[in-house]
Structure formats: C-alpha cells, structure tokens
Image (cartoon, rainbow, N blue to C red):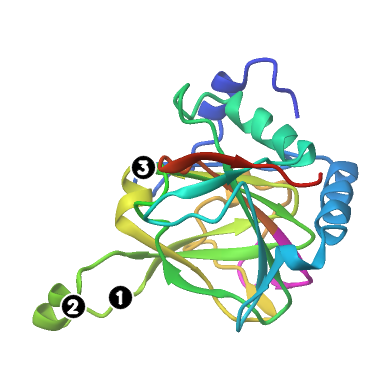
Amino acid sequence: MDLDDPTHLLNTYVVHEIPPLAHYITNFITKAEEEEIIKKVYSAPQPKWTQLKNRRLQNWGGIPHENGMIAEEIPKWLEDQIDRIVAFNVFDENKRPNHVLINEYSPGQGIMPHTDGPLFHPIVTTISCGSHTILKFYKRYDTQEVIKKKVIPKCEFSFLLEPRSLLILREYLYHNYLHTIEEKSADVISQKETKNLSLCSDVFLDDNILKRSKRISLTIRHVPKTTKIKLRFGK
C-alpha cells in the first residue's frame, strides 16, 4: 500500500457505525511480506513459545507486568512493521510501540472476551497473517451492574479481519468494549453485524461461509512501564 501520506490515508479507513475509534486497512502488507513474517515466526527458538489451553503465543520486547516490563530488544523484522505503523502518527512521539504479542490460532481456537487494559498505552494495532477471523465486540459492564440490572452482555458488532490487514483500536472503543474471537472452524458473514465490510478487499454477502485456516496475529502496542535494564537476544 502507498504510505506517501499515511495520516491522510488513515482518515479514509475509519470504520463507521461504531463507537470511536477503529481503522481497518486491507492489504497493509503484501503476500510476500506475509509469507516472510510467518517464516520468521516459525523460525523463532522453541522457548519463545508459550502454550496456553486454546492457543500458543510469543512475546517480543518483554513480558508486560504491573511492576514493569523488563525490556528486550525487538528483532528487525518486527521493528520494520512497527516503523510502518508509527508512520500513521497514531502513537505519540514518546509512545513508540515496544511490545509485540504473536498469537497462533488453529481452526476452532479463539480467545475469551477481554480488554487490553491498563498495562498498555490505549492503542492496539493488529496485523493478521495466514487466515481471516471475526473479531466480536461486547459493551463492557462492571460486575455489580450485571448483577443488579441483570444485564446480559451481547455482541454489538464485529469486524472481519482479512489476511494481511491492519486493525487499529483506540479511544472509547479501547476502554469500554471487550473483544473476542469465538472458537469456531468457520464464520458466517452478517452484513448487519460486521461493520467493516465496505473497507474489505472483497465483496462479502450475508450467509457467506468462510473457513478458517491457521492464523498468526501480531499485536503491536506500547508498554509505558518498563525497567531500565534492557536485555538483548539473538535476532
């Protein structure tokens, strides 16, 4: 994609009909770049992988913690993607992303409703590789509100994340909504629910069925609280 004027381009990729603010950029990386990223992910040393119940992941830049993240050097292949995102000027000058979380999702795997929370500067950027997914959003309620008012959280809208796309979430949407990926092997398109279809690279109609394959996501964020010790690892 052409990044000659990234700030202007960003304004053309706003997702409408939702609380502010989300940007969705299709074909943010090329097919060749996607293949190279996937190759780099799977060439990482085995100890970089953390196995969870429903997926596995890698942390680059350190492991975020409420007491502070011990900073590690981020390899160039990830710094290159950070540079491209920083060019959009969504991050403040002193808030350059310093952490990349890589998740591997096989078909049928997902992640429970969550918010990225206070450990991070309130902007989350995600590059998708390998497969699409559907990211669903739920209004965030506190526990007492759910109990007293008998609120039943429901999906309010969703995004289709295509391979090679970039999603940027911030502002009200970051603070007040949970996002989730359901544990499915295929997704059914809903034009009413899925708010970014007009920005996608293809035309998707109601009831289109999209089968998932293995997906690699790069979640790129800034961790404000870090230690002064910076560890260096092999690239």
* Label 1: which secondary element: loop
Is 165 placed left or right of 112 in the picture? right
Dots 3 and 2: beta carbons under 8 Å?
Answer: no
State the residue position of label 3. 20
* Label 3: which secondary element: loop
Q: Is residue 58 magenta?
A: no
Residue at 30% x, 55% y is 176
- Read off the magenta span: 205-216
Give x and y (percent) for residue 213: 79, 71
Q: Quadrant of the N terminus?
A: top right
Quarter-of-image position of residue 154? bottom left
Quarter-of-image position of residue 42? bottom right
Give x and y (percent) for residue 161: 63, 56
Residue depth check, mark 3 versus mark 2: number of the one nearer the observer = 2
Give x and y (percent) for residue 87: 61, 23
State the residue position of label 1. 153
Give x and y (percent) for residue 82: 65, 35
Which amino acid type is shown beneath numbered disc 3? Pro
Dots 1 and 2: beta carbons under 8 Å?
Answer: yes
**For the residues marked 3 and 2, what is the alpha-carbon distance in whole angstroms?**
24 Å
Which amino acid type is shown beneath numbered disc 2? Val
Q: Earlier in the sequence, mark 3 or mark 2?
A: 3
Quarter-of-image position of residue 8? top right
Q: Does residue 82 lie above or below 149 as drawn?
A: above
State the residue position of label 2. 146
